[in-house]
Amino acid sequence: MAKPHVTMEVGNDGVAVVTLINPPVNALAIPIISGLKEKFDEATRRNDVKALVLTGKGGRFSGGFDINVFQKVHATGDISLVPDVSVELVVNIIEDCKKPVVAAVEGLALGGGLELAMGCHARIAAPKTQLGLPELSLGVIPGFGGTQRLPRLLGLSKAIEIMLLSKPIMSEEGKKLGLIDAIVPSQELLKVSRQWALDISERRKPWLRSLHRTDKIGSLSESRDVLKAARQQAKKIAPNMPQHQACLDVIEEGIIHGGYNGVLKEAKVFKELVLTETAKGLVHIFFAQRMTSKIPNVTDVGLKPRHIKKIAIIGGGLMGSGIATAFIVSNIHVVLKEINSEYLQKGTKTIEANVRSLVTRGKLTRDKADKALSMLKGALDYSDFKDVDMVIEAVIESVPLKQKIFSEIEKICPPHCILATNTSTIDLNLVGEKTSSQDRIIGAHFFSPAHIMPLLEIVRTDKTSAQAILDLMTVGKTIKKAPVVVGNCTGFAVNRAFFPYAQSAQLLVHLGVDVFRIDRLISSFGLPMGPFQLQDLSGYGIAVAVGKEFANAFPGRTFQTPLVDLLIKNGRNGKANGKGYYIYEKGSRPRPDPSVLPIIEESRRVANIMPNGKPINITDKEIVEMILFPVVNEACRVLDEGVVVRASDLDTASVLGMSFPSYRGGIVFWADLVGAKYVYDSLKKWSQRFGDFYKPSKFLEERAAGGIPLSAPASSSSGSRSRM
Ligand SMILES: C[C@H](O)CC(=O)SCCNC(=O)CCNC(=O)[C@H](O)C(C)(C)COP(=O)(O)OP(=O)(O)OC[C@H]1O[C@@H](n2cnc3c(N)ncnc32)[C@H](O)[C@@H]1OP(=O)(O)O
């Protein structure tokens, strides 16, 4: 692949077309930035150049500054790797250029890409070009003048919304708001941009420098009101992150002291933010998510994914109907099979309700919803299975039932058909034991609600073919899921790593810690809700069933809580019947239910594990650690056994499947920031006080002793082995 570079061609019309070339998204890598300086310098000096057009090759203007540079800064701590672009290039060379510069944007102009375009004197766009400043989603703020120029081009409120939510707009909206000067068909983009540049040079069109504009910014007091409201909103949407408030401070600087001073403050704050743990976590997750599509011996061996046009789902319960919804809204035909018409009707109704809720939330138009529902067909037998490309079994967790279903579908379905199960715990080798199609057997583990949660764990056995894995990865992306390929074990990657989460919370309660204090602390840490509210939401039946699976698989490190059975005995089943740890009333947030406390007391008496019968004394920090370090410990075993291809896959899976805060970089990344030794020492101390549940794993012990990060590949630690 050619190295990133910038070209310049000067036409007979006197327009120099400067083109960014760094496929696939023309990221602004260091050579691109120096190339831009060089070409602009040359164009300014040359007498045959009257004006410039800045564009990107390959139908995409630019995806912004090269995020790899952030990673290098994080690895080295050397912030000088980030070049001075904002003043040196965008202000001095582009915006203050003696010749007019027009940006010809197409496909996307994001982050630094849009900031370069805003430094130009006009912007011409192709239809449906994405325009945005998503830097906050990487833990930084726009650093090439975006915090100053966007409000000046389209007004403060809208600019703040685009930055705080990291939400791009389309060029059509950009035109209405004043960010874009004209929209022209892609094939005319360069022609119109050249003419526009000449028109500016000959004063037929205005020569505008965005940073000098004030017409879209209201009075100081109006601006302060907008900023005040935005600060409140930022507190709510990003409580543990610094970049949102910092972005608003920098915008305010420009409003009070002028755009240029705003640019100077922006550059300073930008560099400070690059070094924060938030930026480290978010940049890590950016690359980690993209790495999940690279599976050795699957995606790098020249296989082509087969097209999956029609699938069948067996079982129309909560999971089956959620999965069916995800497929039909992505235009894939689904046959939903149930054992009787009553269940089938129930499943169909759930799917209809799912689709309706997507319409209500603005995620789907009415037309698309109708089209989606027309892709669904109910069935009570296998007659429609003859031409399906994949079956996903989503019945109850019963081994004999699953074995029966798999031996039936093996006979009915075409030989290329993928035979998938949505089991969350059962060994796939057992599921497929009665078939001779082990190469087609695979796990498609969706997370509930399946039409909303983004993670799809693809579980492979030693015998699953690379083709089946690739096909499921591909169709997973088609239905807008993030597929992560994992190995076969109880709980697979996510549920396996996180089973100690709920258990440790239970253990703490039985050591005398208040349930609501635990939930509050875990929410403040950044998970959307604490373990008890989560248990209320998923239902106690699941907690009992899953608890049994893990107790069987890992008897030495499970805590058998009496509490869930007691709650059920007392007529509680969580949110499903409105009675759990919390009170659920329509229209209001869940409120702690004091009437659950006597049941907890009873459970404490039964468990009888409080030292000297007294509640333990514990700090807030310790509570969070005692809940999350056992998760890290189990994650270490997942890594050691090679259940995931690489540690960063577990980070992605923890963020997308468990809503672990992305700004903490995922479970393993976070543990490495905390430090393997500290995690090990803490677990060791608790295991001595409270038992083997906290006993550090061998992998953790070795990494802590060797000073090796948990995320380092298996070869970094002598005792580790890999099964993948
Ligand atoms: C100073 C400035 O203000 C700071 C900045 O500009 S920070 C950067 C701001 N820009 C962004 O946040 C955009 C990040 N990129 C994206 O959101 C998406 O990649 C996209 C919408 C541009 C394209 O999405 P999509 O077509 O699905 O392709 P996607 O798989 O994400 O990316 C393709 C490749 O480009 C890489 N890439 C995308 N944007 C990149 C960037 N800004 N820097 C470096 N690499 C980038 C990806 O890592 C991926 O590499 P891989 O093929 O080796 O895995």
Image (cartoon, rainbow, N blue to C red):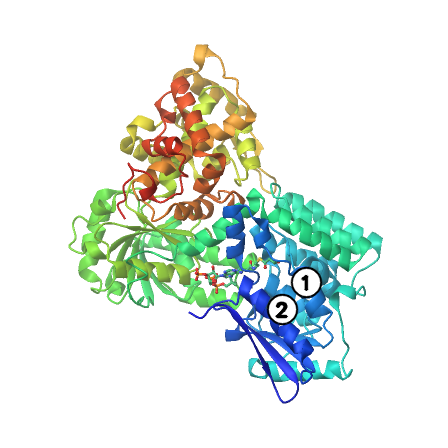
Give the number of the disc on residue 88: 1
Residue tagged 2: 37
Q: Is residue 126 left or right of residue 227?
A: left
Q: State the residue at coordinates (48%, 64%).
A: 369
Asked if the residues shown at circle 2 and circle 1 are in contact, with their CB atoms under 8 angstroms apart, the answer is yes
| Residue 515 at least partly seen | no
- Label 2 crowd bin: few (<14), some (14–19), many (20+), radius 10 Å: some
- If the image is split into quadrants, where does the N terminus sit? bottom left
Residue 354 appears in the rendering: yes
Q: Residue furthest top?
A: 612
Pick the residue in front: 260 or 560.
260
Q: Circle 2 sits in a helix, a strand or a loop, which is it?
A: helix
Side of 632 where 177 appears, left or right: right
Disc 1 secondary structure class: helix
- Work out whether residue 135 or residue 273 is closer to the camera in this orientation and state it: 273
The residue shown at (72%, 57%) is 263
Q: Name the spot of residue 450 as percent of width and height, x first.
A: 42, 51
